Amino acid sequence: MSKLEAKLYGPRWKPFIGFIALILALPFFVHAPHIFTILILIGIYSITTVGLNLLAGYAGQVSLGHAAFFAIGAYVSGMATTKSAISPWAALLLAMAITFAVAWLIGIPILKLKGHFLALATLGFNIIVYILISGLTDYTGGALGLNNIPALSLFGLDLSDPLHFYYVIWALAALVILFSTNIVRSPIGRLLRSIHDSEIATETLGVNAAKYKVYIFALSASFASLSGSMYAHFIHFIAPPTVNTSFSILLLIMVMVGGSHSIWGAPLGTAIIMFLQEVIRNVSHSYLKISGPVEIVVYGFVIVLVMMFLPQGTISLFSRLDAAFPRIRNKTLKQETGG
Amino acid sequence: MKAAKRKWLAMGMAVAVLIAALTACGPSKNNSSSSPSSSPSTSASTEASNSPSASPESTESKEIKIGLVLAETGPASTLGLSEVQTQKLFQKQLDAQGPINGTKIKLVLQDYETDDTKAVIAVDRLLSEGVVAVVGATQVSTTAAILPKVVDAKLPFLTVAPANSKASDNVFVMTPSSSTVGSVVLEWLQKHNITKVAWINAKDAFGVEGKPAFEELIKGTDIQIVAHEEFDATATDMTVQLTKIKKAKPEVVIVWSRTPGAGVVARNFKTLGFDIPMIQSTAAANKGFLEQVKDDNKNIFVVGSKLSVADKLPDSDQKSRLIAFRDAFKAEFNAEPDLFAAHTNDALSMIVDAVKAGNTTSETISNYLRTSLGQYPGITGTFDFAESRGTAKADGLVVMGIENDAWTYNE
């Protein structure tokens, strides 16, 4: 059975253990604060992209509006903690609940749309949220943004220290990833895949596809909300331009580059895009002396390359590497079946 | 065969990406003096003191770094560009001048690409380079976004956009506040006996700040706002808002917006055939705006820096100071400096002043700016941080008109 599972979904614990080891080890090697900040941002964004991956990769529903859910999380957390004495963690859960409810409600009509229409509807939702947060100045601070969002603390641990925040955000990301791999391996996960491949075929099996689509949409939105809240507490500031539609598109690019067919593609893609931004900056500014929106051009180029040579995303390189070294694979397979 | 080839290509690509990522991870390479030994958990202030520049032992000419976070690219680059140019000019002047009391000053520029999150990363990068002061950011919201980080690191933060100077003793604002700019507008209105004004502003951080400040100023006067409209900062047509304003029959339209929005309003204003004056905030006092309203700019006034009309000023210390800066800027870039250039130049000059007085650490520079700077004659205007760290005085501002597509000024 476990052999079949490994064949179907790939190894389960091997990447997870590798991932944990990497997360624990990185602070010992990374000393520059800005790289550390980027690692934290990768953790924050990964939570959103994992959710987006469930939605886009597994259920096949493209969302161009995830920045809106990120925004709801960031703003609910920000408003609750700056304007009332509510605990930041309670605010974070409240934000997730609100986002889940909002996504559920708009998901019911929106997910009846397919393909481009769905993408457009979610894009529209993002614009609506953007206008609301820019316009409701009394509550959101409008264009001036929300200032002085307090730092988090966990059981007396002060998370304004970047190292502490790093471990907490990646622990959260690990939980989200674990939860998501569980979903993927559950009957619901198989249903989502079948919706992805053919919604009609799935419905002929007597399954209410719409229900599962809405469910996964709302779940994915609440992940985005969680990461939005963490962003607000990390940066201590949130303003509307951070959550405009180009951020939604960037999130989708992260998922595509990483690989939408595996949960692990999301954090990988997020890391690639975030570091790519750094590389582009360094190369174009310091060496080529070009300034301007070079990134967009490079993103486009990277997407074309990935689509041409790695349609399954960068994550598929790992399985290819696995295939290229059969001895290691056999060994680990043996271990897994034995254990 | 084909599949195998494809596989290798893909692998090669991945390796290339990996290498590229690794080079980016290395300790910041454009500067040799960052301190890679400090752990990430140590706070930024200790990093600053770890860096060789701050250690008094280093012999001969030591170097201190001043960080700048400016929008060289992205939508805010219309404002950020002249700030970046000022930084380049200033560095050139510093290099020509040689070390000050044995201290070399290096300006480290970070382009934040009009993205708040990138600005936060940029500040981290500056902290790891051990800068002793931070100058930035081009936009109001970005300044608010990086403020906590700079304040936490206990660095003097000289903002070139309006900011909350009450957040910390180390925040110094180089711009005239909305209230200061508003007072210049008010004076102009009173001089022209105008009482009914219409107000239109962009819905961005700069735009929304003006009206509350102005309302505070006109309390007790006979001036009233008869119409108020807002537009999206990136909108390309404001005729709807202006049409509504027209109905209220104001005697002047006041615009509070950055460019390009400011220029779009002005063009629409002309298209709709308004025969009343329009007065724009300091955010429109740049070349981009002049180009936007080219050939059709009668009755458009802008609160700008005296810098733009320096030749027409009566002789004074201020005049010669402004002309010296303008000529240096013009010689370097063949362009007129604007207010944003003035803010950046003032910030850098103040820090250099502090260094001249023998202050080379963030703490002593901050202290100097707070207590010993006195009445500082800047390009933006006079600064008196003992009175307020939140604004420059209005003596550097003037209401300008446009004549032959150039700024003009009639007393």
Image (cartoon, coloured by chain):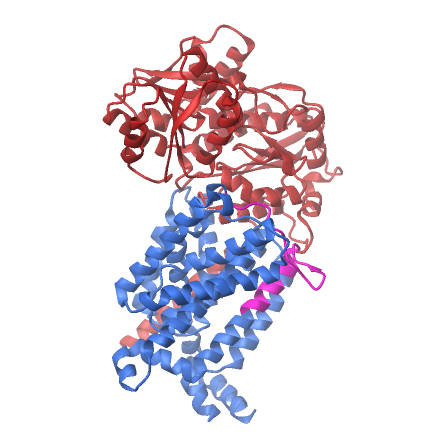
Please state the extent of the stretch shown in magenta in the rendering.
A145-173
Q: Compared to A11, does B356 lie above or below?
A: above
> Picture coordinates of residue B24 (x, y %)?
51, 55
Q: How many marks?
A: 0
Residue sitting at 49 percent across and 88 percent down? A333
On the question of residue A188 being in view, the answer is yes
Residue B362: in magenta span: no
Position in image of residue A241 (x %, y %): 43, 47
Q: Is residue B349 left or right of residue B308?
A: right
Q: Residue furthest right?
A: B57
Figure quadrant of residue B233:
top left
The image position of residue B396, as x and y in percent, is 52, 18
The foreground one among B368 and B104 is B368
- In the image, B74: left or right of B132? left
- For the N terminus of chain B, the image quarter is bottom left
Quadrant into which the C terminus of chain B falls: top left
> Is residue B260 at least partly visible in the picture?
no
Say which residue appears at 48% left-offset and 36% top-offset.
Answer: B138
Chain for colour blue? A
Residue at the image point whose x is 38% and y is 46% from the top? A293
Q: Residue at x 33, y 70 (%)?
A: A311
Could you say which quadrant of the image residue B389 lies in? top right
Q: Is residue A172 above or below residue A183?
A: above
**Quick one: which chain is red?**
B
Which residue is at the front of the view, B211 or B265? B211
Residue A162 lies in magenta, yes or no? yes
Residue B368 image position (x, y, % from top left): 70, 27
> Would residue A17 be found to the left or right of residue B277 on screen?
right
